[in-house]
């Protein structure tokens, strides 16, 4: 049975008035307002200031430090470092003091900053400004400084700066903020809705950034997100407590401008703010219902959020409606993350200026804490800090039916070992609970577990890694969802991920085979060499290697194969990983043929010589992943067709011919006559196939018109441009592309070369090589040690003396990899001395390692050229062979 709220709680609840008809006036629509920020240097001591004024500021400093946290007290040793008076300045409403960050190993300065401001009614009292907490590293370059002070309309200031320890900081300045005005500042005039005390805490009414006139052009970068929220911190903003309702949007705009333009942060520091009228306001951009990383509690912005009370609560107690609203937003956010308002949690300090704890220190803190608990500051003011007990009690009453601190005994297990995983949680009422286990890749429900619990009997749900039929589940990623319910309501659903890894096995070592000489090529329709989805094969485990023998598989000859062209594809990867491919028995290569982001499907083409016993090796770096390997062509020791590289020729573009390729649909593509050779005389085509504009995940297969086999030549996903090399076996000069996925996608096909018998055309034989790196901009190999900037072209010498291929080579075959691209971009390769082609070779998502096999004709001075389309990116090139 739920307890009734105590008299303490009832005393701060807002009574519900009877319904009275009202006439709603026409309200001005909110609009962005750009604040004005003016800065002035702070230097020297104003000799015009009277000794009495200086003495009074000294006394004010003592009084202010008396209200601050004990560890932040300390009397200046001598006269002020700075004492500046300015009057008759342009009107401002908020002020703060900032300075340049010290050098990396320089000693930090500890300052005492006092300020008073002038207005039509004279000088204000002196106010000691707390130091602003340092933000997370994701904020970029920032300036240390004080918290901002809301003054209201002012035309002058007097500032005193005392250096308590360390050197005087460079670039000391005062920042004056005029937040501007909007007809909508008087609105909204709403109040807070009272959510049910039974259901899990709902979001209270929170006025948005748009409603307070946030200029979204002011903030910088993109939001960062915490994995969870472990604690909520209570702050105050300092400044006047006598503001009006219409002042509040101005205050928010001014704080926003100071945090960005003064402190140099990416956005306003607080996640939420509350005014003295009990109204809640959205702070930092990124989604109120998400765990946005703020800049509020120095050293402890990770896994936390903050609500700041507008005003100075060293001088006054926070109004009951403000305390109530703080509790409501805490109940909502902590309830979302299953935290006990009366509990404790552990945070790891990131260190920095105002933090009480050095970086790396693990600190046990109250789930609801004040800023002063973690930083050397008086925030949130002595009076509001004393009200934290009331806030915790109110939060507990508003949080509703919930579970506290759900967790797993382990997030990983190994298939076939008999392991199990237990989910635990503490319900706050008598509840029935249910656990559902779903396979992530297929979103299939595999197991349901139920039980009962109470505050004295926590949830304990054991999953033995079996499905409802009793069979052991397949290795891969699974979501485990826990929800409880009592007689009144259900809890929020807690969901986490469990990884069941395959057991790692290692094949016996194979002897290395000598690299073959020059060889022709035979294009084939995809021949399945290996697939973890068939023949009872399990997914690859972390760091697992497999060896696959190539000759004799499908229609491949039993002998006489020197090297092989493969299409490799992955799906259901539980972690970001990379697949390396090489000749069995040879040294593990440094570059992967395929790079895979966790949870995505990916594919790539690669070429490798065969090792001992005609085998190749493949290795999965991380996580567990499904893997398919198809042969799309081979290089015989004798015979085969010759290759003719060509200028990039667009064969098909669905944007101009038929629209998106539907799921299950295919298009037949005809190769034109080239070099006076009719397409009917060609045996294969080397292609660059691009898929994009998809509504869902899927794959494009390239094959001959008569083939019924398929493989993922290009795996695609929504919002991504994917570009892969592919081989098409030609029949009468034609081939087809098929969408084997469940979503339509645009497809573009570019021809970059073709094969035909030697008696038909004069062409080139392929010479495989051991993988050799010729370019790495991370290390200065082959080019300057620096990222390749947008639009910049670099020249790379790939042939000749001290290079892996002779100076007589006509074309190079290499794996081209882009790493750490700052923006989604594309990379183009072409011969040095020739005009850059219109179509790129590599599509690169931002910050995702991406590789593609490229065949580039070698230009003047044995060089090729590479260019990056946007942002900046590192480029790596590894030669796998060449055409003499």
Image (tube, helix red, strand yellow):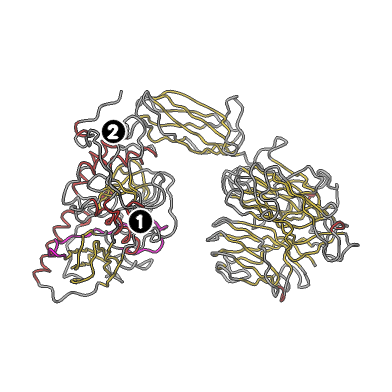
- Residue at image point 22% right, 47% down: 276
Q: Can residue 613 be seen in the rendering of this structure?
A: no
Quarter occupied by residue 774? bottom right
In this orientation, which residue lies closer to the viewer: 655 or 49?
A: 655
Quarter occupied by residue 754? bottom right
Q: Residues within 10 Å of mark 1 (few under 14, many from 20)?
A: some
Q: Residue furthest right?
A: 759
Please state if 513 lies on the left or on the right of 489 as rendered: right
Please state if 556 lies on the left or on the right of 351 as rendered: right
- Residue at image point 34% right, 52% down: 29
Quadrant where the C terminus sits is bottom right
As drawn, 504 above or below 235: above
Could you say whether the residue bearing mark 2 is in a helix, strand or loop?
Answer: helix
498 falls in the magenta region: no
The numbered mark at residue 870 is none
Quarter occupied by residue 538? top right
The numbered mark at residue 31 is 1
Overall secondary structure of the magenta section: loop
Highlighted magenta segment, given as a residue range? 119-144
Q: Could you say where residue 359 lies in the image, as x and y percent from the top left?
A: 37, 54
Camera-nearest label, 2 or 1: 1
120 falls in the magenta region: yes
In this orientation, which residue lies closer to the viewer: 434 or 552?
A: 434
Could you say whether the residue bearing mark 1 is in a helix, strand or loop?
Answer: loop
User: Which residue lies under the disc numbered 2?
Assistant: 397
């Amino acid at each position: 049975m739920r307890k009734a709220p105590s008299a303490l709680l009832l005393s701060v609840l807002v009574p519900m008035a009877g319904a009275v008809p009202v006439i709603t006036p026409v309200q001005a629509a909110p609009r962005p307002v750009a604040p004005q920020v003016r800065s002035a240097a702070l230097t020297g001591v104003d000799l015009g200031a009277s000794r009495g004024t200086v003495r009074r500021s000294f006394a004010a400093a003592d009084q202010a430090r008396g209200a601050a946290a004990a560890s932040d007290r300390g009397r200046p040793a001598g006269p002020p470092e700075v004492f500046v008076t300015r009057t008759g300045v342009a009107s401002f409403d908020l002020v703060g003091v900032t300075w340049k960050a010290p050098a990396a190993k320089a000693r930090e300065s500890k300052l005492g900053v006092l300020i008073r401001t002038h207005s039509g009614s004279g000088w204000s009292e002196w106010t000691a400004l707390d130091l602003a907490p340092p933000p997370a590293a994701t904020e970029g370059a920032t300036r240390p400084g004080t918290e901002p002070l809301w003054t209201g309309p002012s035309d002058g200031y007097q500032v005193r700066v005392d250096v308590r320890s360390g050197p005087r900081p460079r670039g000391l300045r005062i920042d004056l903020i005029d937040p501007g005005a909007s007809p909508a500042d008087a609105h909204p005039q709403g109040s807070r809705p009272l959510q049910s005390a039974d259901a899990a805490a709902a979001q209270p009414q929170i006025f948005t950034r748009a409603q307070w006139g946030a200029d979204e052009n002011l903030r910088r970068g993109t939001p960062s997100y915490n994995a969870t929220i472990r604690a909520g911190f209570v702050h105050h903003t300092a400044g006047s407590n006598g503001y009006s309702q219409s002042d509040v949007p101005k205050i928010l705009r001014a704080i926003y401008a100071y945090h960005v333009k003064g402190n140099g942060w990416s956005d306003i520091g607080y996640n939420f703010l509350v005014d003295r009228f009990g109204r809640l306001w959205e702070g930092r951009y990124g989604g109120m219902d998400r765990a946005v990383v703020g800049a509020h509690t120095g050293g402890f912005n990770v896994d936390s959020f903050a609500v700041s009370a507008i005003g100075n609560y060293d001088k006054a107690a926070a109004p009951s409606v403000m305390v109530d609203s703080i509790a409501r937003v805490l109940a909502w956010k902590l309830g979302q993350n299953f935290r006990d308002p009366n509990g404790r949690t552990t945070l790891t300090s990131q260190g920095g200026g105002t933090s009480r704890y050095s970086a790396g220190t693990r600190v046990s803190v109250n789930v609801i804490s004040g800023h002063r608990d973690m930083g050397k500051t008086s925030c949130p003011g002595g009076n509001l800090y004393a009200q934290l007990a009331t806030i915790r009690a109110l939060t507990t009453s508003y949080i509703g039916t919930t579970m506290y601190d759900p967790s797993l005994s382990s997030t990983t297990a190994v298939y076939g070992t008999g392991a199990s995983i237990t989910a635990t949680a503490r319900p706050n009422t008598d509840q029935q609970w249910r656990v559902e286990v779903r396979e992530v890749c297929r979103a299939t429900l595999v197991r349901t577990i139920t039980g009962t619990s109470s505050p004295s009997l926590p949830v304990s749900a054991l999953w033995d890694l079996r499905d409802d039929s009793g069979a052991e589940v397949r290795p891969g990623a699974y979501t485990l969802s826990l929800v409880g319910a009592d007689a009144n309501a259900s809890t929020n659903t807690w969901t986490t991920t469990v990884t069941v890894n395959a057991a790692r096995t290692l094949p016996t070592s194979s002897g290395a085979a000598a690299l073959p000489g020059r060889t022709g090529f035979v294009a084939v329709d995809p021949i399945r060499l290996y697939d973890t989805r068939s023949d009872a094969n399990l997914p690859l485990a972390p760091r697992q290697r497999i060896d696959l023998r190539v000759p004799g598989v499908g229609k491949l000859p039993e002998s006489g194969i020197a090297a092989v062209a493969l299409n490799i594809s992955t799906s259901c990867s539980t972690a970001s990983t990379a697949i390396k491919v090489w000749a069995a028995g040879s040294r593990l290569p440094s570059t992967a043929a395929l790079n895979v982001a966790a949870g995505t499907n990916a594919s790539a083409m690669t070429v490798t010589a065969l090792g001992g016993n005609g085998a190749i090796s493949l290795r999965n770096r991380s996580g567990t992943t499904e893997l398919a390997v198809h042969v799309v062509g081979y290089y015989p020791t004798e015979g085969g067709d010759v290759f003719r590289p060509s200028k990039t020729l667009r064969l098909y573009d669905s944007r101009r011919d038929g629209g998106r390729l539907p799921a299950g649909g295919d298009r037949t593509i005809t190769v034109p006559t080239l070099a006076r050779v009719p397409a009917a005389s060609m045996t294969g085509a080397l292609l660059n196939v691009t898929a994009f504009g998809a509504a869902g995940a899927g794959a494009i297969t390239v094959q001959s018109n008569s083939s019924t086999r398929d493989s993922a030549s290009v795996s695609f996903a929504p919002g991504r441009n994917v570009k892969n090399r592919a081989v098409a076996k030609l029949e009468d000069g034609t081939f087809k592309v098929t969408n084997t996925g469940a979503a339509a996608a645009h497809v573009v096909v570019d021809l970059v070369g073709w094969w035909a018998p030697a008696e038909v055309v004069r062409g080139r034989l392929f010479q495989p090589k051991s993988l050799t790196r010729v370019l790495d901009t991370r290390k200065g190999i082959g080019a300057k040690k620096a990222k390749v900037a947008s639009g910049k072209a670099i020249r790379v010498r790939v042939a000749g003396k001290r290079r892996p291929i002779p100076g007589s080579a006509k074309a190079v075959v290499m794996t081209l990899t882009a790493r750490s691209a700052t923006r989604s971009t594309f990379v183009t390769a072409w011969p040095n001395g020739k005009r850059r082609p219109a179509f790129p070779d590599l599509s690169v998502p931002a910050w995702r390692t991406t590789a593609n096999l490229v065949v580039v004709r070698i230009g003047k001075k044995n060089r090729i050229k590479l260019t990056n389309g946007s942002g900046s990116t590192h480029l790596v090139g590894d030669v796998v062979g060449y055409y003499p």
